[in-house]
Image: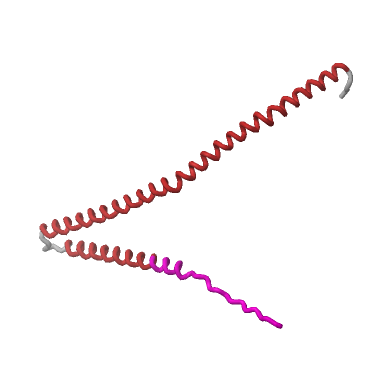
Amino acid sequence: MCMTEEIVEIPEEKEENNEGNNDQRKVAIIAIVFVLLILGGVVAAVLGLLNENTPTERIRDIFIIFMAFESLVIGVALVILILQIASLMNLLQNEIKPILDATNETVHTLRGTTAFLSENMVDPVIKLNANLAGLQRIFEILGIKKN
C-alpha cells in the first residue's frame, strides 16, 4: 500500500490588512482634494478682491464668510480633540490603571519577600558567621589554632 501525501498550502488572509490601507488612502486622498479645493477657492477670492472696482461691502461679506468657515474648522478640531481626550481617559482607566495596580501589588509582594528572607535567612547566617568568627578568635587566643 502506497499512500501519497498532498501538501496543501493555505493562503494567508491579508485582504483585511489591504482593505484597511486602501480605506486610509481613500480618506487621505479625499482630505487632500478637499484642502486643495479650499485653497483654490481662497486664491480665487483673493484675486477677485484685488480688482479695483470691487466694492467694500463685498470684501466685508467675503471676510465674514472666511471667519465663519474658520470658526467651523476650529469647532471640528475641538470636537476631534474632545474625542481624543475621551479615548485617552478610557485608555488610562481601563488599561494603564490595572497595569499600575498589578505592578504595585508585585512591588508589595517583593518587599514582603525581601523582609522575610532578611529575617529568616540573612540574619541567622550573619549571626552564625559572627559567632564562628568569635569562636575562631577564642581558639587563636588559646593557641589551639594558628593562622
Which residue appears farthest toward the front when viewing the image? 1
Looking at the picture, tell me which residue is in the foreground, 119 or 103.
Answer: 119
Q: How many marks?
A: 0
Using the rendered view, name the quadrant where residue 53 is placed.
Answer: bottom left
Q: Residue at x 15, y 63 (%)?
A: 51
115, above or below 8, in the image: above
Q: How is the image coloured?
A: secondary structure
Looking at the picture, tell me which residue is in the foreground, 55 or 69.
Answer: 69
Looking at the picture, tell me which residue is in the foreground, 50 or 135.
Answer: 135
147, above or below 16, in the image: above
Query: Residue 83: x percent and y percent?
Result: 33, 52
- Taking the magenta stretch, the answer to whether it contains residue 92 is no
Looking at the picture, tell me which residue is in the foreground, 124 or 72.
Answer: 124
The image quadrant where one finds the N terminus is bottom right
Q: Residue at x 55, y 38 (%)?
A: 107
Query: Residue 47: x percent and y percent?
Result: 20, 64
107 vs 48, left or right, is right
Q: Residue at x 47, y 45 (%)?
A: 98
In magenta, the rendered stretch is 1-23
58, above or below 106, in the image: below
Query: Residue 66: x percent and y percent?
Result: 20, 57
- Taking the magenta stretch, the answer to whether it contains residue 10 is yes
Which residue appears farthest toward the bottom when viewing the image? 1
32 vs 142, left or right, is left
The image quadrant where one finds the C terminus is top right
| Secondary structure mainly formed by the magenta segment | loop
Using the rendered view, name the quadrant where residue 25 is placed.
Answer: bottom left
75 vs 114, left or right, is left
Query: Residue 67: x percent and y percent?
Result: 20, 54
